């Protein structure tokens, strides 16, 4: 198994769903919930940075490590 930096965000979300033991019938809903949480965390981080500097870009989410950090 590779480390969190070597995998994509979608794969990390699927790993989290698998780790939590979500039943097969609810996995799609759990993926959607985690994506929503990830997007909210990204927006919150952008807003926090904007308060500090006046302007901020959305954080880049391009690895599983980013997903772990935000979710």
Image (cartoon, rainbow, N blue to C red):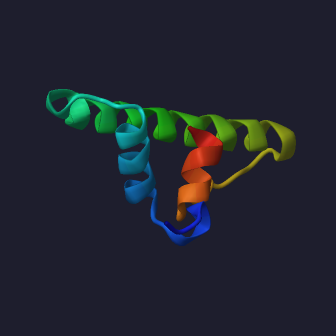
Across and down, in percent, residue 11 comes to 39, 58
Judge by depth and name the residue closer to the eye, 13 or 40: 13
Across and down, in percent, residue 22 comes to 30, 29
Q: Residue at x 75, y 42 (%)?
A: 50
Q: Residue at x 61, y 56 (%)?
A: 65
Count the marks: 0
Relative height, residue 66 to residue 25 (above, below): below
Identify the image quadrant of the C terminus: top right
| Residue 45 falls left or right of residue 4 | right
Q: Which quadrant of the structure image shows residue 16? A: top left
| Residue 44 falls left or right of residue 16 | right
Q: Which quadrant of the structure image shows residue 36? A: top left
Judge by depth and name the residue closer to the eye, 31 or 43: 31
Judge by depth and name the residue closer to the eye, 24 or 57: 24
Query: Can residue 26 be seen?
Result: yes
Query: Can residue 61 be seen?
Result: no
Q: Residue at x 45, y 57 (%)?
A: 9
In this view, the residue farthest toward the left is 25
Q: Residue at x 61, y 42 (%)?
A: 70
Relative height, residue 49 to residue 29 (above, below): below
Across and down, in percent, residue 34 comes to 41, 35
């Amino acid at each position: 198994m590779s480390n969190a930096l070597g995998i994509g965000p979608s794969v990390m979300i699927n790993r989290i769903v698998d780790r939590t033991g979500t039943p097969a019938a609810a996995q799609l809903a759990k993926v959607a919930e985690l994506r929503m949480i990830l997007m909210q965390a990204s927006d919150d981080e952008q807003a926090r940075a904007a308060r500090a500097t006046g302007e901020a870009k959305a954080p880049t989410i391009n690895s599983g490590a980013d997903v772990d950090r935000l979710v």
